Image (cartoon, helix red, strand yellow):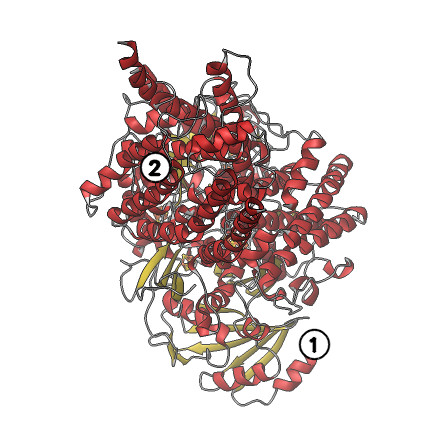
Amino acid sequence: MSVLRDIIERKAKRERVRRHSLTGEGKVEADPSFRGRVGLKRELCIGCSLCEKDCPSAAIQIVQDEKGKRPVFSLDRCMFCGQCKESCPTKAIYMSSELQLPVFDRKALEVR
Amino acid sequence: MQMNAEEAIRALTGAEGVQEIKALSERRILVACSRDAYRGVVGRLAGLGFNHVVAMTGVDMKEGIDLLLHLGSSLMVTVRVRLDPSRPKISSVSDILPGAEMREREVRDLLGVEFEGHPSPSRFMVSEDWPAGVYPLRKAFTPATAAPETRRSGPG
Amino acid sequence: MGIIDWAFRKSPWILHFNTGSCNGCDIEIFATLTPKYDVERLGALLKGSPRHADILVVSGPVTRQASGRILRIYEQMPDPKKVVAVGTCCISGGVFSNGGKGPCYNVYPGLDSLVPVDAYVPGCPPKPEAILDGISKVAKKAGVGCK
Amino acid sequence: MWSAILPILQTIVFPGFLFLIAVSFLYEWLDRKIYAWMQFRAGPVLAGPVGILQPLADFVKLMGKEDITPAYADRRIFGAVPIMMVALIFTFWAVVPVTGSAGLVSFRGDVVFALVSMTFFCMLVFLGGFSSADRFSLLGAERAVLQLLGFEIPLMLSLTGVCIHTGSLSLSGIVSWQAENGWTLLGPQAIGFIIFLVAAQAELERIPFDIPEAEQEIVAGWLTEYSGRKLALIRLAKDMELVFVSGLAVALFLGGPVGPSPAGLEWLVYPAYFLIKLALVVAILAFIRGLFARARIDQMVSFGLRYLVPISLAQVAATILWRLA
Amino acid sequence: MSSSYERIFDIPIGPQHPALKEPAMLKLKVDGEHVVGVDLDVSYNHRGIEKAAEYRTYIQNLYLIERICGICNVAQTLTYCLAVESLHGKEIPARARFLRIVAEEISRINSHLLWLGVAAHEIGFDTFFMHIWLDREITLGLMEALSGNRITSSYNVIGGVRRDVTEDLLSRIRKGLDDLEPRVKRYREIAINDRSILKRTQGVGILSPADAAATSAVGPTLRASGIKSDVRADDPYSSHDQVPFNVITSDGCDAHARIIVRLDEILESIQICRHCISKLPAGPILQRLPRRAPQGEAMSRVEAPRGELFHYICSDGSDKPYRCKVSTPTLANLPALVRMLTSKGRYVVNIADVPVILASIDPCFSCAARVERTGGV
Ligand code: SF4
Ligand code: SF4
Ligand code: SF4
Ligand code: SF4
Ligand code: SF4
Ligand code: SF4
Ligand code: SF4
Ligand code: SF4
């Protein structure tokens, strides 16, 4: 019954739990330090492919675009570890604090 | 139990079958011994208070399979034995150190080391359909010889 | 059949299956039950028996040993049923898949190679908010009409 | 004409079948909300205003789902059990007074009749689990019967106390006695009330006595193999049972629906009283559910036999002495 | 209660079972409601990590090793980094060592609270579970602020830690710890006083000190059997010798003692964190190390939340380890578990107690299942 006492005391202190709203979906704020989806600042990338070499889950493929080589991230394999950000010599990769939102189709995750 | 490295080395030098004793660092000691002396050395260590089994490691060194038994309190002693790679076989120490039983089983499944006198002789495999005689931690087991499975290569 | 569709959307009962995960995703799925996230707001209950569940929430890389189980559980669930793959491992094998980097000889490259998956929640582990979103999105699609 | 239709309407609509179903859903919702409140959660919110339609959504959804009968199950019994459960509770519901001091049906000895329902229900649980031919179901079924051993006798004794106290063997008699003598029953029979609630918790298979369907031990116990429509009916039956047992508690210890009322408005005020008192009992049951850890089956049975039985016996003895004095 | 029927049959617990968050399989031999034998199968979680580690570079392995387990990922990476650093023969900066302790202790608090919640759930006490997990969000918030993710932190890297702390963050951590402490004390009170908890845990899952030592049990399981053993104290690995703390033990030897030991450890961890934050040295947080490790072998031990965690790395001088061996606390505690479950006729184990006993060693099979299968009895 000591649990009851605990509940009453906490309720008396008007402790409230902040939950995110279910209806305004997608509007979830993460802590700014959160390691969310990876992103590339295209203009900084020099195409050295170090990120691809160090990525632990082979989520990066180097492709050729009009400006030369660049990485493409497969978000269905990426595990948001941030190693590519650490490895990049020009700091072209950043981790946004965006929460990756669920998708219905795996293909939607494959390029970016 | 609170032996320091020097005392432990002194206590072990001259034991039968011990080939080499060296201190790797302040609290790590490596004892190499022959296969036949292994049991005796472990027994002696257990008598000295090293009766906590930290882990047992098997390493396929190509020229032989190294079996490492890590015993420890605040000081950790590693007993190293080299086994014949074609038919690795050694006597079990799970009667001296009951904590070693599952460790031996792990090494047996992954490296195919045979432990003589082990209380549960049944073999345990990766999954029920794991092929017999394939030991994943042997160096001969490579990605190419990995279990047959549908596999997508590369990202995507 | 408005009311039945409505009921399907409002009452997604969950069955959680761990196919060999590192626990990260399981914990976060479990965390969605707790006060801060409270999946019951959606009407969802965590069920123990596949027979009672509508949504199968899977976490972890699908290991060989677990693959048979997942098929069986999927079959045991009554129609209509949905599957949500939570975590990178479950979606593709993630760090455990080979992808040219060496073997995890015991892992399937993603849950969708075994059972049809209705939603993917990437992350390692995804935040509970993301899992909640995944479940509610799938629940919104639910109904007798769409299998 | 009207006098012919009225009983039928009473049976089907109010306070009969439909009313019972509506009230069951309402109180399942209440139970879940209180439970969630204790856990700092919100409980269901999306289905209808403040989630009040959640039990309905669950029910309708389960009705719409595929209904699987396991291959090894005894099909006839397996399928019959859910329907029998609903029918059973509905039948017994007739004796619970809702609109006045008497229920739809009232006769001498209906207290015993009501008591028997619990045993019947337990038998159906056993049959349901047994016919599923599943390990977990079987264990759950066995546990349900073992549990019955633990709580049935104290339950009976707590009722005996009330019957002796009021000198009546019918619910209507007990309710009218309370109406005449004010609220003097709850005082002397407080222990009986508590024992009744504890036993009810066991009968309803709720924490701390949800042993027959202990999720962490035996998946969903005897319910494991049920799905779809059958599960919907079982859940409905269990909700109805919650209302039925709480209704009995209201009638036996809280004076039933009777209370002060402006003359002529009894038909409206009494059911309202009933619902309020019912809510009170359900709330107490929800609190019990939230505040304890699950007991073990042997602990449960020995708790029943070692503590509840002597206490309730003492209660009965005291009541007899009081009557004699 | 003695069973009225003589029937022995097998009950599988798992691999998909509400009592196990993970797909392990416990095959119980049951006579009525009593357990007479047990067989363990943890292969459902086998992913092939040790082999995979041989094909990945040291950097990639960090993330692979981290994902051996989501709960003690901090301990796992710490052990791995210690081993690699010791291959290089390099000391890491003092500030990094202290930050590692902070991260480690936060994850310990997190793990113990998580476990306590699960244990409450195991005995059917969901309200308690919800309360504990509500307060656990505090530590998850701290972890996210410190490292960037609630669970998988990627905080320790070879040569130091990834992120530095700001004053702002330190005060946030201090506040979080201050909020948490009274709550933990309250839970301790409840765990000691609540009768329904006592009923389910006292005298359940008894492991005598002799058995605990013989089976090489580790961590809180060992300490709850009255044996004073803690790698942090015995084999200080990350400036632990500069931090004052007590090794918590209990003489209860049962599931309840394990609850109390873990709760006391949380309080101790809060003190350690506070100490480290107040004494945090200035300086760099990372000592860059080359990609290739020198030839040799290294062994490291860390006190993970569940007990002693051990890594062995053998290097052949390339950028990939030659052999990487992980030995985890759950595996070390399995023999003790089997001993508690079968009891060999000394006392009766009820089926309903199995989840409690299982939970009391705080098993998480994802790390134990690097081995194929472990058989009991
Ligand atoms: S400097 Fe180092 S990282 Fe850059 S290309 Fe040369 S080897 Fe690669
Ligand atoms: S975050 Fe990690 S897994 Fe994702 S792309 Fe970068 S290195 Fe690869
Ligand atoms: S490491 Fe940086 S610069 Fe090099 S390819 Fe990747 S993103 Fe571009
Ligand atoms: S295909 Fe290879 S890399 Fe992928 S899961 Fe299977 S074993 Fe692992
Ligand atoms: S996605 Fe990440 S957290 Fe989830 S199971 Fe895989 S490794 Fe663990
Ligand atoms: S259990 Fe060991 S050998 Fe097997 S895959 Fe895992 S790490 Fe490799
Ligand atoms: S004991 Fe192993 S699996 Fe469990 S939390 Fe620690 S590292 Fe993870
Ligand atoms: S014991 Fe193993 S599986 Fe469990 S949480 Fe720890 S590392 Fe993960």
Q: Nearer the viewer, residue E278 or B59?
A: E278
Residue B2, label in figure: 1
Which label sits in the foreground, 2 or 1? 2
Q: Residue at x 77, y 48 (%)?
A: E274
Q: Chain of mark 1?
A: B
> Residue E256 location, x and y as percent?
59, 59
Question: Residues under labels 2 and 1: Cα distance?
Answer: 57 Å
Q: Amino acid at mark 1?
A: Gln
**What kind of element bears circle 2?**
helix
Q: Residue at x 49, y 30 (%)?
A: D175
Report the residue marked by disc 2.
C52
Q: Amino acid at mark 2?
A: His
- Check disc 1: other Cα within 10 Å, few if <14, some if 14-19, many if 20+: few
Q: Examine the image and state in which quarter residue E222 appears.
A: bottom right
Q: Left of C96 or right of it: where is E281? A: right
Please indicate, yes or no, whether residue E151 appears anywhere in the rendered image: no
